[in-house]
């Protein structure tokens, strides 16, 4: 009987570890959804560092109802008349291209370049759709190495 108990105990342990691994992989243990429902006004700069003249798009006052770095980028899209290409990952959205820079055929894509953002000159530490911003923040997206 003791050998049977040991086998059952081992099966329970293995199953518990497998379930915990699955829960971790799907993000069950993360802090949950980010509250992005606050309306904020912020400034936005989009820089293309691989251009000869370092083209920059600047938006002084953009208001968004999705108070994230991604939300402000979306809100400025209409005024700036640019497109955004994204991909979904476990940790959130990844910006692949802005204004066809970064993910296009025969255009400005360059090896080793990618889109990164800063909020008030501090480098982003999470996916753009999970980084909450506040009124008056300065957001900068840069396409660079």
Image (cartoon, rainbow, N blue to C red):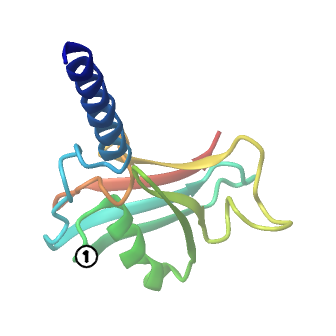
Lateral position of residue 90 relative to residue 98, left or right: left
Lateral position of residue 110 relative to residue 63, left or right: right
Q: Which residue appears at 41% of the width and 74% of the height?
A: 74
Residue 128 in the image: above or below residue 37: above
Q: Which residue appears at 63% of the width and 60% of the height?
A: 55
Image quadrant of residue 34? bottom left
Image quadrant of residue 51? bottom right
In the rendered image, the residue lying farthest to the top is 2
| Quadrant including the C terminus | top right
Instruction: State the residue in front, 72 or 7.
Output: 7
Instruction: State the residue in front, 110 or 3.
Output: 3
Provide residue 72's location: percent of width, then percent of height. 34, 68
Write down the residue under mark 1: 63
Instruction: State the residue in front, 57 or 107.
Output: 107
Lateral position of residue 22 relative to residue 100, left or right: left
| Quadrant including the N terminus | top left
Element at label 1:
strand
- Mark 1 closeness class: few <14, some 14–19, many ≥20 residues within 10 Å: some
Q: Which residue appears at 24% of the width and 18% of the height?
A: 6
Provide residue 91's location: percent of width, then percent of height. 39, 49
Provide residue 95's location: percent of width, then percent of height. 52, 59
Image quadrant of residue 67? bottom left
State whether residue 46 appears in this view.
yes
Residue 2 in the image: above or below residue 110: above
Query: Count the marks: how many?
Result: 1
Lateral position of residue 43 relative to residue 143, left or right: left
Q: Which residue appears at 15% of the width and 63% of the height?
A: 35
In the rendered image, the residue lying farthest to the front is 1
């Amino acid at each position: 009987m003791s050998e049977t108990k040991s086998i059952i105990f081992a099966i329970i342990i293995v199953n518990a570890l497998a379930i915990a691994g699955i829960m971790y992989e799907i993000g069950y243990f993360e802090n949950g959804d980010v509250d992005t429902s606050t309306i904020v006004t912020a400034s936005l700069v989009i820089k293309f560092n691989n251009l000869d003249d370092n083209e920059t798009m600047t938006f002084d006052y953009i208001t968004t109802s999705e108070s994230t770095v991604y939300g402000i980028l979306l809100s400025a899209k209409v005024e700036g008349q640019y497109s955004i290409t994204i991909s979904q990952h476990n940790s959130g959205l990844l910006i692949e291209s802005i204004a066809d820079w970064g993910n296009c055929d025969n255009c400005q894509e360059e090896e080793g370049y990618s889109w990164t953002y800063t909020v008030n000159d501090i480098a982003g530490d999470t996916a753009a759709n999970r980084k909450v911003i506040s009124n008056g923040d300065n957001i900068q997206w840069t396409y660079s190495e």
